[in-house]
Every structure is written in structure tokens, then in C-alpha cells.
Image: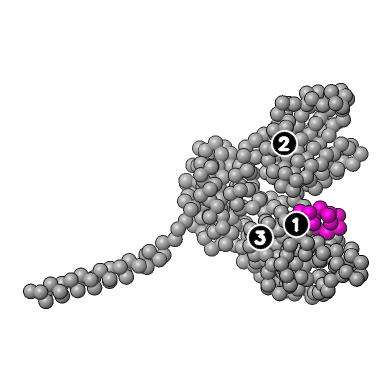
Amino acid sequence: MARILKLGWLSLAIASVAASSDAAPSQETTKWSAFEHVNEAQFRKAIKENPYSLVAFTTPTNFDSEALEWEWPAIKEKEPNVLSVDCSAEPDLCLEHDVRAYPALRFYRSGSLYARYRGPRKASSILPYMQRIMRPVVDGLEAANLTSFKDSDDVVFILHLRSQDAGRGLYKRFHDLAEEFHDRYTFAIASRATDGSADELGEDAPSVLRCFNHRDGREAELDHFFQDVGSLRRFVVGCGERLVKQLTRLNAWGFTEGTDPVLYYFDADPEARDRFADDMLPVAKEHAGRVTLVAVDPFVFPEVVNRVGLPWDFPSLALQNPATKTMSLFNKAEINAGVVGRFIADVLQLNPPAQVAAAEEVVPEVPEVPEIPEDEGVVLEDKDKEHDEL
């Protein structure tokens, strides 16, 4: 009897092991996902019935879509009207909505596309965008809320407007620019008659546009609008952008084919590139007008890595000097503000000859640009201003 019991328990143990081994494949293939993808019918219902919706168009084979997925819980916690679409399951829907790069983020109101998000795929950037895009394109301010409003976003523009300048078209020009950059910056207007400036500047105080760039700790103002019609746009672009740029598909050509020196910082770690932008602010300010600092993801822009002639060893620097048609490379030490400042000064011969370090000067051959899969965030028509990248 005991032997029969033992065999019975043994049979149960074998059956249990077999059952667990049979179940194992389903456990291994179950993939965690923060996305709760909707189908076409659910998508159309949501954007029609919600007061607004933020939609992420993704694909499971794309690295940037996976990176956004890790940010999605923080976004959903703050914003209830967010949803996602798997373009591998709904290709016709994504084609209908002109999705050409992944992940594409679109903001809908009243069932229609209202805006395309072109910034970093991070909760820390997407959530402020949501607040910004739901504001009026241009807020109206009084003296009482001027101070608090200038701190309401990373970059804020406030136009203090004389009534006679509004009649000369300044308000319309400002509003047109605000519509163009509404997804990136916050805009407001205050009448000179009510902004509290009369006591200090007199009743005929001139119109002035003030910029508050809190990301770079910069403030600037513009008070000549009619001598040069392009000055207003240049001011908004120049003050709104970070001094240390991030390379994107929209701006890459301007740097790689431009006529001004560019210092590229290559690092595959997005947090390291963000730290570089913050840490190099003093260097960028010191060399403003002489060289532009740009952070690059080498895996998104392998053609730029090959173009400058760098080995695949990061982080590293390359200084492109179109005037001398040279590319100077650096990847031999810790990269910090002091190292970068000396490297720029040495290569551009801003130091006395005795202090010039031994930078490696090369004139690289431009290799054949490798093919990049279309699902790696690459836009098929780079010159199209309506795609989903900054």
C-alpha cells in the first residue's frame, strides 16, 4: 500500500512539473505594457466624445515607442484623456492620420486634429505641453498678474503694446508667431495703458517684447519692430531655443551643411545628453556667435557619426569648422565644461600657440550613408514642417 502511495505522489509530482513546464511558455511570452491600445472604433469614439484627447501612435518594434511606454503611467496619472494606438494592428488608421514617425503624439479637440507634439517623448515635457496647448494662443494680462505669469512656463513671451502700434499691425504679427510656436512657448499681451509702466516710463512708453527663458536662465527684450520686419521672428526663435541644441531631423541639415562652427557631443544616453545641455550653458554663453553646441544620439544619427569620422566609442566630441574644412575629434578624457571650453578654444585658435593642445585634425571622407529603418523615428520627408519632430 505504501509503495502504491509513493508511486501516486511521484505521478502527481511528475504531472505538476509537466503542467508547470507546459504553462511556462505563456508566462514568458506575456509582456508588460503600460499602453492600453484602442482599436479604430474606440479611437473615433474617444476623440469625438472627449473634450480633448492626446493620442500616441506607436509600434511595438520601435525603441522610441518602448521608451515612451515607460513614461506613459506618469502621463496617465495627470491626464485622463490619453490613449494609444498600435499602428501594427491599425495600419489603415495610422495611414489616415499621416503617421510617418514613431511614436507620433497628436492632440485632438472636437474630433479633429488640433496640434502635433514635436518635443521630447518624456512626461516632464509632455505634461507642460498639455497645459500650454489648452491655454489661449495669447493670454491677456493686467498689471496684477504680470509677475506670476512670466514664471508660468519654461519659456514665456510678453508683449507690452501701445495702442498705436497695434494699429500698425504689431498685434497681428505677434499673434501669428504665437500660433506657430504655441506648442513650445507661452505668449501673452499687456496694454501699455494698464500694465503699470506709465509711472516709470511715462504714458507714451514704447512697445516692448520681453522673453523669459527659464531653462537657460536668460532674459531679453526687443523694442524695434518696424525697421526690420524679420526681427520679431528672429527674436522669438533665438530667445526660445536652448543655447545647447539637440540634433533632430528638422535641424540636422542646418548644422551638418552650415557655414558656422559646430561642436557635436555624441552620447547614446538621453539623460547624459540632457545633463550636457545644462552643464555646458556657461560654455555656450561664452562662445555664443562663434560655435554652436549640439547634443547627438549616435544611434538615431549614425550617418553623422560616420560623416565626422568618429569611432563608435562614446561619449565623444567633434568640432566641425567649415572655414578650415576640418573636423577635430576628442574622446580621450572625462568631458566637462572645462574640457569642452579648452577644446573649443584650442581648435578655433582662441588660445596662444603655446597653450594649444594636441587635437586630432582630420578631413574625413564622407562615407556612404547607411540605410536607417523607417520605424526608427526617421521622417520620410525631412523638409515637411508638419511632421512630428522638432
In the picture of the structure, the residue carrying the numbered disc 1 is 280
**SS for dot 3:** helix
As drawn, 381 above or below 209: below
Residue 332 position by quadrant: bottom right
What span is colored magenta in the figure?
A: 280-292
Mark toward the viewer: 2 or 1: 1
Q: Residue at x 85, y 67 (%)?
A: 347
The amino acid at mark 2 is Lys
How many residues crowd around disc 1 within 10 Å: few (fewer than 14), some, or many (20 or more)? some
The x and y percentages for residue 65 are: 56, 57
For the question of whether residue 381 can be seen, the reply is no
The residue nearer to you, when weighing 224 against 166, is 224
**What is the spatial separation of the Cα atoms under label 2 and label 1, in whole angstroms?**
25 Å
Taking the spot 90% from the left edge, 41% from the top edge, the residue there is 228
For disc 2, the marked residue is 150
* Residue 314 - label: none
Is-magenta flag for residue 274?
no
Identified by mark 1, the residue type is: Met
Pick the residue in front: 245 or 202.
202
The earlier-in-sequence mark between 1 and 3 is 3
Q: How is the image coloured?
A: one colour
Q: Crowdedness of circle 3 by 10 Å Cα count: few (<14), some, many (20+)? A: some
